Image (spheres, coloured by chain):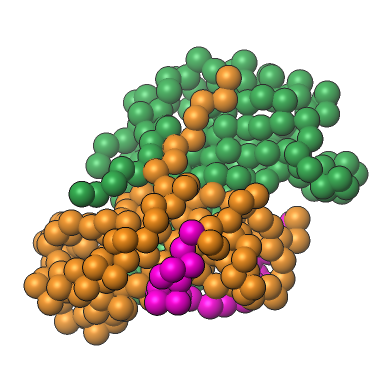
Chain colours: A green, B orange
């Protein structure tokens, strides 16, 4: 089913990473991880990326701002069963004053098999308005630092996909 | 944030529907339903659709076949908090001998507010091979019955979306 191991190898070690194992509650009736819990792991991985730019619990409490996902595209490439170690790596594909375009790959612990990919658009929201709002200056600077480190990584083959009509 | 209440009203009452309420475990640190649990509700709603074409627990056990999601596109339109009643309605956008193109809308119980949409491609898999496999004749006939009832519904505005580069 393909894989991007080779394509992101250059910057892999420096990417924000979330590690976990497939929990019993994540299995569906087929005995594999249910589609929603792939996304739970991706969601926790984006939290690691948000922490890296300073959008953490303290920020949310102090600034009354947070980041919400508005759109997500997931590709499921491989099944995975109970207890399997997972590694989710996250990078930016782009950003503007209040949005992040985020790419995540879920890998087996061997780092060779890509189990799933997720592409997301996330928006910075000021809950006191409530409305989309630009990142504050310090956060925007951290986004720029992350972007400078990641912008030269190859564009993922599955980014920008849409589902085509089946006819 | 838009909504499709009017666009699917014609066939709404006949669509496979899953009802639930937002559980405490589904909330994230913002106090809203986490992105992954929107998908859990969508996943359960597609189970209602699969039941309607005879792909249920008995089928999976007897035939050693099941249906797996391979690709999903979600739009998050509105936040939703603890205890909120949800209704997810599911329809086919297309199909072939072994694939279903599925469209789901998550609505507030008032049926006027669309909280989220999900577009999925699902593939029928024979676990004894294991490989994608055509639906057996009886299932294919049920898919055709469902398709005949739904094929004239308007194409959803958000179907076929892709995430565009942010530059």
* Image coordinates for residue A110, horizontal then vertical, percent: 37, 41
Is residue A109 visible from the viewing direction of this image? no
Spot occupied by residue B93 in the image (x, y as percentages of width and height): 32, 57
Q: Residue at x 31, y 78 (%)?
A: B51
Q: Is residue B86 above or below residue B75?
A: below
Q: Quadrant of residue B67?
A: bottom left
Give the residue at x 66% y 32%.
A99
Report which quarter residue B120 is drawn in. bottom left
- Classify A10 as above or below B51: above
Q: Is residue B7 left or right of residue A122?
A: left
Residue B20 part of the magenta-drawn span? yes
Q: Tell me the residue at 48%/59% (across/down).
A: B7
Please state the horizontal and vertical placement of residue B105, each as a whole percent of the image: 50, 62
Instruction: Say if the magenta span includes residue B73.
Output: no
**Is residue B150 among the parts visible in the rendering?**
yes
Quadrant where the C terminus of chain B lies?
A: top right
Left or right: A17, with B81 as reference point: left
Q: Foreground: A6 or B76?
A: B76
Taking the view exactly as shown, the residue that stands out farthest to the right is: A62
The residue depicted at 39 percent of the width and 52 percent of the height is B155
Please give the range of residues in magenta: B7-29
Q: Horizontal placement of B108 versus A136: left or right?
A: left
Residue at far left of view: B137
């Amino acid at each position: 089913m393909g894989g991007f191991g080779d394509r992101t190898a250059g910057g892999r070690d420096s990417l924000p990473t979330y590690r976990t194992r497939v929990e019993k509650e994540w299995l569906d009736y087929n005995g594999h991880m249910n589609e929603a819990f792939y996304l739970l792991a991706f969601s926790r991985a984006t939290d690691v990326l948000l922490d890296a730019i300073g959008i953490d619990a303290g920020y949310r409490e102090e600034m009354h701002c947070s980041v919400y996902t508005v759109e997500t595209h997931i590709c499921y490439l491989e099944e995975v069963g109970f207890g399997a170690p997972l590694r989710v790596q996250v990078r930016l594909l782009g950003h503007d004053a209040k949005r992040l375009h985020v790419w995540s790959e879920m890998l087996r612990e061997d780092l060779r098999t890509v189990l799933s990919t997720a592409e997301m658009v996330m928006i910075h929201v000021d809950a006191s308005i409530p409305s989309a709002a630009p990142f504050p200056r310090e956060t925007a600077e951290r986004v720029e630092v992350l972007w400078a480190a990641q912008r030269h990584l190859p564009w993922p083959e599955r980014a920008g996909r849409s589902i085509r009509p089946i006819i």
